[in-house]
Amino acid sequence: MNLRIRKLRARLLICLKFVFPIIVFHVVEIMIIFIFEESDTLYELHECYLDELPGKISTNWSLNAGHENLEDVLLSDIKPIPGRAIYFLETKCYSLNSQSHYLINLTARQTCSIESAALHNPNFQVFVLFANPKVIDPENPFLNIIRSYSNVHLRQLNIWRYVKDTPVEDWIVRDNKFISRFPTEHTSDLLRLLTVYRFGGIYMDMDVVVLRSMEDIPLNFMGAQITNVISNAVISLEPTGIGHEVGELFLREFQQTFNGTYYLFNGPMLIERVLAKICGTKSVIEMINNRERCHGVRLFDASAFFILQKLIYLFDPRMLNDGIEKTKNSYLIHLWNKGSQKCKLVGPSSTYGRYAAQNCPKTYAAAGHLF
């Protein structure tokens, strides 16, 4: 009897080892939603995103030699090559009253993300897209770093022009149904889907460090962030064929099920809903292990993009060897944005510090303690 009890306990511990991270993730998710839902303010798109700089501010910038207004990505002579580009998005919703908010102000970590993508993927274009009109300050050292890479392009976009000839055009422009408590986050959810639908290629969040080339990975992939949870932090689609069809499914799902009061519903949860329909299963493990089910769409396991959810592996020098070992086959590491804001880079003696020094060397040299 004692032997049977011990075996049962061992099995329970094994189960808890795998289930506990999932439970923790969803508890945190619910807490985030609960906190954010304390706000009852709903925003329309036009309250955050303009077509052009306000007249007075535009005049002021024109008097400052060297400042450049960003070109619109759809109107520029240099446009993304379909299926051969990596995209980053900045969708912060700023006050319309201060001209400083129209200056591009990338952090060291964001610059590192962009530099690492450009460094490892020289045959891909890297587009950094801003959802409001922006001005380039020629004295900004981080901007000068990323502009030193010939494959990096800074562009703004006009949301109303960007949705033209897409499945959500009427819903956004005519019906004005995009009303949200979280305009920054939900706009980001929408624009990443629009971008890979329009151009194909790879979208990734601006809180990553790319560790190696992604040019030879067949497009049409996403990643699980823990055992049974999918992320929308990396989305890759072909510009034609099944990739374009999946992109259309994502946009139609966004329109048909959009909920402006729930933080994650239009992002990671949307990807899960659509992939469940495509793959004929809700099991993320089945999607990963049985790729034929998903008709050409690949779901990577957590080791590809998101393995280091325990930030101690990234920032604690005592965990350097463990962190390097856990990410030796990863394409990128993910810093989990706000979750790691107060974590400091400790030179090259931490996993993050080591990877920053190797994969965004110009940013690392310029940033110092700003990481």
Image (cartoon, rainbow, N blue to C red):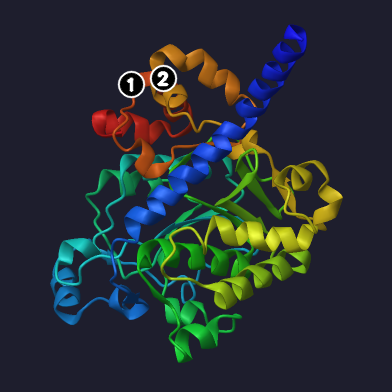
Q: Which quarter shows the N terminus?
A: top right
- Residue appearing at x 41%, y 39% in the figure: 112
Image position, residue 214 (x, y; %): 64, 43
- The amino acid on which the numbered mark 1 sits, given as a three-letter code, is Val
Label 1 belongs to which residue? 346
- The amino acid on which the numbered mark 2 sits, given as a three-letter code, is Ser
Label 2 belongs to which residue? 350
Residue 361 vertical placement versus 139 (above, below): above
Q: Which quadrant of the view contains residue 227? A: top right
Residue sitting nearer the eye, 107 or 62: 107
- Residue appearing at x 46%, y 87% in the figure: 173
In this picture, residue 353 sits left or right of residue 286:
left
Q: Are marks 2 and 1 in contact (CB under 8 Å)?
A: yes
In the image as oriented, which residue stretches furthest toward the right? 292
Q: Residues within 10 Å of mark 2 (few under 14, many from 20)?
A: many
Image position, residue 358 (x, y; %): 47, 26
Image position, residue 371 (x, y; %): 31, 33
In the image as oriented, which residue stretches furthest toward the top? 2
Residue 289 seen in the current view: yes
Residue 93 vertical placement versus 161 (above, below): above
